[in-house]
Amino acid sequence: MMIIKFKAALPLLLAGLFMQSDVHAQAKKPNIVFFLVDDLGWTDVEPFGTSFYETPNIKKLAEESMLFTNAYAACPVCSPTRASILTGKYPVGTGITDFIEAERAQPVKWSRNTPLIPPTNKDRLSLDELTLAEALKTGGYKTFFTGKWHLGPEGFWPENQGFDFNVGGHNAGQPKSYFSPYKNPRLSDGPMGEHLPDRLAKETSRFIADNKEHPFFVYFSFYSVHTPLKARKDLVDKYEEKKARLGLLDSFSKEGERKLRIVQSNTTYAAMVEAMDQAVGKVIQGLKEQGVYDNTIIIFFSDNGGLSTSEGHPTANLPLRAGKGWLYEGGIREPLIIKWPEITRAGTVCQVPVISNDFYPTLLQAAGLPLNPNQHTGGVNLVPLLMSKTIKKRALYWHYPHYGNQGGSPGSAIREGDWKLIRWHETGKEELYNLKQDIGERNNLVVKDAKIAQKLSLKLDAWLTKENAVFPEKNPNYVE
């Protein structure tokens, strides 16, 4: 049996959950259910502000949980954030700094008239990484993946990265269809018209029922609410009626040269959000029916900001600026909810900035397993925060040396305390914002608070050097 180790500083309450006989410790390990939603914006669920989309199951979960109001994805697009969750590293540490398959156009076939040519992006998560799933599996957990993977070609799918079961995860970044037939090599078709979120919830509930006698790790990685924008007709009709009743009109502004949605009123997207919420509810109900809800850690998170500047402009992220593909808050700030029975207090709010790299060491600690600082180099253990205590203050970093499909350009950023600095690589210019006073990032203080900007800029330089960050190069074919 594995000997479970704890840092001496851990409170006795937490240690007492596990540090008994080996057999009893195994039985007491908490199950883990991690919901990751694709392209869900910070204000797209009721606990974080939406008044149009309806998410009653997530609202109920939030009432029983701790909410993190300053939680971040490690990147404004999907694959890098997904890699950060599974490795505990910043995207620069895995070499996955853009969505996978972007390398087909970047930089070898780069034809866009841009001042810079982005660097090469790795097209797979290396098998040399000890993933979170592999670490938990070694610690006695049954591991289950369902939904979107998007971390490499066949041979680098969930079953190759520590998951005992893989339902629906392969190289694709979006589903061919949200309704059966799915044309998915890791998901058999259901009855004609079966809805994908519902199917994945049923598969997850079946796994929970079959494995309730063992500690388990469920990673429910939704394809929702990514494009294609397709939803159940009954839910679309519901939101068409609601939109008319509320007198909502589609309204747009601009972010740079891009059209920007500023009102949450897209009825198809609203229907997709509610179907996602229903799937969350079905899994939670399955935990309750199997008698394991009170010994299960539940995490709810998104991989990047809401899609607001392209591809149908389905959601609005106000009061945050911009959205997916941008280093402004709308592209990286995420709704985070964590419920850990007997550890988190219902209805509590944590304002400490955290990032997706942090899940790895946090869940190792929660599972009673030793931390592995050589692996999760970009994350810290959040267990003290979950117990309403404190962690050491630190800076958070981003490096996105690519042109987003949504209008964003290559840049890097740092947040420390209330201050955030963004550096744009096309020009070298920097922007400085006080997020406590200006969450919408409208008042650039880089001149007014030059000393703070210089301090953050130097810290960002040091971090980029330490991480061996790669940068875009000048485009010799650029025409102004």
Image (cartoon, rainbow, N blue to C red):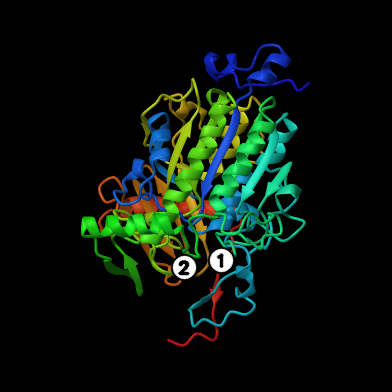
Looking at this rendering, what residue extends furthest in the top direction? 20
What is the quadrant of the C terminus in the image?
A: bottom left
Three-letter amino acid code at the position of disc 1 = Phe
Name the N-terminal-most of marks 1 and 2: 2
Q: Which residue corresponds to mark 2?
A: 425
Dot 1: element: loop
| Image position, residue 329 (x, y; %) | 38, 54
Asked whether residue 123 appears in the rendered view, the answer is: yes
Q: What residue lies at 76% left-to-right and 23% top-to-bottom?
A: 2
Q: Residue 379 is drawn in which quadrant?
A: top right
Dot 2: element: loop
For label 2, count other residues whose C-alpha is less than 10 Å away and answer few (under 14), some (14-19) or many (20+).
Answer: many
What is the quadrant of the N terminus in the image?
A: top right
331 with respect to 146 (left or right): left
Q: What residue lies at 50% left-to-right and 85% top-to-bottom?
A: 478
| Image position, residue 170 (x, y; %) | 68, 57
Q: What residue lies at 60% left-to-right and 25% top-to-bottom?
A: 30
Residue 471, numbered circle: 1
141 is higher (above) or lower (below) than 190: above
| Image position, residue 98 (x, y; %) | 57, 62
C-beta proximity under 8 Å, tags 1 and 2: yes
Looking at this rendering, what residue extends furthest in the left direction? 247
Residue 437, numbered circle: none
Q: Is 73 or 186 nearer to us in this picture?
A: 186
Looking at this rendering, what residue extends furthest in the front direction? 191
How far is the residue under mark 1 from the one under mark 2? 8 Å
Q: Is 98 or 153 nearer to us in this picture?
A: 153
Three-letter amino acid code at the position of disc 2 = His
220 with respect to 262 (left or right): right
